[in-house]
Amino acid sequence: MTPHVGRVNEGRSTLEDILKPAARIRLTVTISRVWSNRGKLVKLGAVQVLLNMARLGQTMARVLLILCNMASCPVSRPALLDSGAVECMVGILRGPREVTESTRESCVAVLYGLSHDGGLRFKGLALAANAVEELTKVERSGRERAKQKAKRVLEVMRAKMEDDSSPENEEIDWEELLNSGSVSRSQYRLGGDGEKSRVNSSEF
């Protein structure tokens, strides 16, 4: 029998009700499948808790499934970007813990969801996290589904910045940056308007 998929009642539910104990993650997976619940999970502060659990490797498969659901939704996607989801997923792919193929595939799926709008914001965060190197590894040696998603994310990152014609961005050789796979967080940061701005590494 298919389990009933309920809606989050913001008046009665708390973050602890949904995410603690860990066994309730199963319920959160079900809840996150409902489009309208994803925004409510954001309001309850679930994003940072889920990312912290992912970093610690706690109930990884289910946590990543929830993050995949939320990354695919334009309502919850901005909160994931704000909370460091790109850096978190790249960090899991990079290590230091060895991850399973299933975990690699799920991390790439989250990045794929976050890349859907193809905006400068995602590109800036992905470059800062040095995602190119890890995605290239998956594209070369991952499972077929993960390869396709990694390829798509890399294509999004390589796309020309058609929506930003400022002289500053025209001077940047994005193809060279992406192919080098060596962009550091100290070289780029997000500006207040969501666009990428160049900063001097001496500021950090």
Image (cartoon, helix red, strand yellow):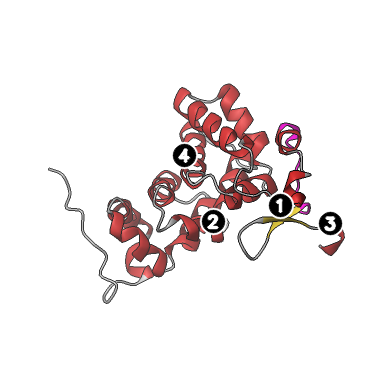
Side (left or right) of 24 relative to 148: left
Q: Which residues are magenta?
A: 179-187
In this view, the residue in front, 33 or 2, is 33
Tell which circle, 4 or 2, labels the residue nearer the N-terminal end: 2
Callout 1 crowding tier (Cα within 10 Å): few <14, some 14–19, many ≥20? few
Residue 99 in percent (x, y) is at 55, 37
Disc 4 designates what residue? 109
Disc 3 + disc 1, Cβ < 8 Å: no
Q: Which mark is residue 117?
A: none
Tell me the residue at 32%/68% (across/down): 17
Instruction: Indicate the quadrant containing the N terminus: top left, top right, bottom left or bottom right.
Output: top left
Q: Is residue 19 visible?
A: no
Q: CA distance from mark 1 to mark 4?
A: 32 Å
Against 138, is 74 above or below? below
Q: CA distance from mark 4 to mark 2?
A: 14 Å
Residue 105 in percent (x, y) is at 48, 34
Tell which circle, 1 or 4, labels the residue nearer the N-terminal end: 4
Q: Secondary structure at mark 2?
A: helix
Examine the residues drawn in magenta and state their main secondary structure. Answer: loop
Q: CA distance from mark 1 to mark 2?
A: 24 Å
Q: Which mark is residue 81?
A: 2
